[in-house]
Structure formats: C-alpha cells, structure tokens
C-alpha cells in the first residue's frame, strides 16, 4: 500500500509557516485524517492518488506565535485553495472568499483549516504563498485602487472580520470596511490605507 502524502502545494505552505514562525505551537497542527475523518468524506482523507488535500495550522501559542490574519489572508490569494475555515467563518473560492458563518461541529477556533481543490493541478501547484513569507509592501491605497495590493488588503480585512468579495477593486464596500476597521482600531478614519492602518493590520 502506498503511503499517503500531503499535497505539494500544502507542503510549501507548511514550510513557509515553519520558516517564518519556527517556534510556534504545533499542538493543533494536522493533515492526515483520524478515525473520525475516515468515517466521513473529508479532504483530510487520502484520495485515489494517496494525496491529502487539507492542512490544519495551530493558531495560538509558542515562543514565536504566528500572525493569524496572515494565515487566513494567504489562503485567499493562493490559486490552489478551495476554502479556508477559521473561528466559525468559512471563506470559499467560489464565493470570492466573502466569508459566511460556518456551522460545522468543530468551530476551528484553535486552528485554521486549508482545503485545496481535489485536482492534480491544485496538488502540484508550486506558486509561492507570499503572505506566509512576509508582510506585503503596499503603496498608499484608497478608493479607486485596483490590482494585487487591493486583493491583499481585502484578504487581510476579511481575516480581521470584514465580509468583502476579494476582487481587487477598492470600491465603496472596501472603503466602508477600511473605515470600520480604522474606527475599531481607534485611528484616523479616512478610508486611506497608509502606514498607520498597515501597522494595525500587520501588528
């Protein structure tokens, strides 16, 4: 019997996380399913290629605790991802990662769950998980901005509680989400993502 292995794309994610946060807690980490998973359909179970297409990442503890928003946001920008779950929210690629309430038995409040698409292409996708490697460098972002920096901003805002469609367009809803985040953080409310707002998102 061939031994099951974690999909290559998720192996890269785990390596990036371990490199950036080497002394993080791994108690809730996991990838291959236990007996409970084996009794039901789960991406933690090996597929017919003996690949496992799910990864759980412990979100708390350790002497170098990881940056939780980066873990969630990184999934929304990787082409292999099908969905991600954390803290009773699910972010699905088919919904452009606009989160909805997750009502599964496990609230995923101690770990973040990555599931990639059940395809060879997703399993073998070697695109870098850039938001797991370092905080992004953005220009000044405001209404009307488009492109990769805005995609990353929307992903971080969703990871911090917003409910945006991650589409790379800084429109009225993204502007409102930025202002709500600034208000919550007690900083200047102007809808402009500059050093102060970035500092809170990355802090």
Image (cartoon, grey):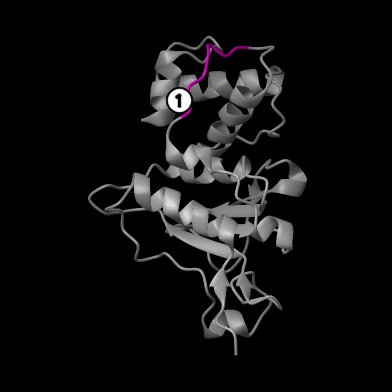
The quadrant of the picture occupied by the N terminus is bottom right
Q: Which residues are magenta?
A: 136-142
Type of secondary structure dominating the magenta stretch: loop
Q: Residue furthest left?
A: 63
The residue sitting at 68% across, 34% down in the picture is 166
Query: In the rendered view, would you say 58 is above or below 162?
Result: below
Where does residue 7 sit, x and y in percent of width and height? 59, 64
Query: In the rendered view, would you say 63 is above or below 191?
Result: below
Of residue 102 and residue 131, the one placed in the foreground of this image is 131
Helix, strand or loop at label 1? It is helix
The residue sitting at 44% across, 31% down in the picture is 135
The quadrant of the picture occupied by the C terminus is top left
- The residue that disc 1 covers is 184
Residue 137 in sight here:
yes
Q: Does residue 114 appear left or right of residue 21 in this picture?
A: right
The residue sitting at 65% across, 60% down in the picture is 123
Of residue 164 and residue 41, the one placed in the foreground of this image is 41
Q: Does residue 160 appear left or right of residue 80 in this picture?
A: left
Indicate whether residue 140 is drawn in magenta. yes
Indicate whether residue 126 is drawn in magenta. no
């Amino acid at each position: 019997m061939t031994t099951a292995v974690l999909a290559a794309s998720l192996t890269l994610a785990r390596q990036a996380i371990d490199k950036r946060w080497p002394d993080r807690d791994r108690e809730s980490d996991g990838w291959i399913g236990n007996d409970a998973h084996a009794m039901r359909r789960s991406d933690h179970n090996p597929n017919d290629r003996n690949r496992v297409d799910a990864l759980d990442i412990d979100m708390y503890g350790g002497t170098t605790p990881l940056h939780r928003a980066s873990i969630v946001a990184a999934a929304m920008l990787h082409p292999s991802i099908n969905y991600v779950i954390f803290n009773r929210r699910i972010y699905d690629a088919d919904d452009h990662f606009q989160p909805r309430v997750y009502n599964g038995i496990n609230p995923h409040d101690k770990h973040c769950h990555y599931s990639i698409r059940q395809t060879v292409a997703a399993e073998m996708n070697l695109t870098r998980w850039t938001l797991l490697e370092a905080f992004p460098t953005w220009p000044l972002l405001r209404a009307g901005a488009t492109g990769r920096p805005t995609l990353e901003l929307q992903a971080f805002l969703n990871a911090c509680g917003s409910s945006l469609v991650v589409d790379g367009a800084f429109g009225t809803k993204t502007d409102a989400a930025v202002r709500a985040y600034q208000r919550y953080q007690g900083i200047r409310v102007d809808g402009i993502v500059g050093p102060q707002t970035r500092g809170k998102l990355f802090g």
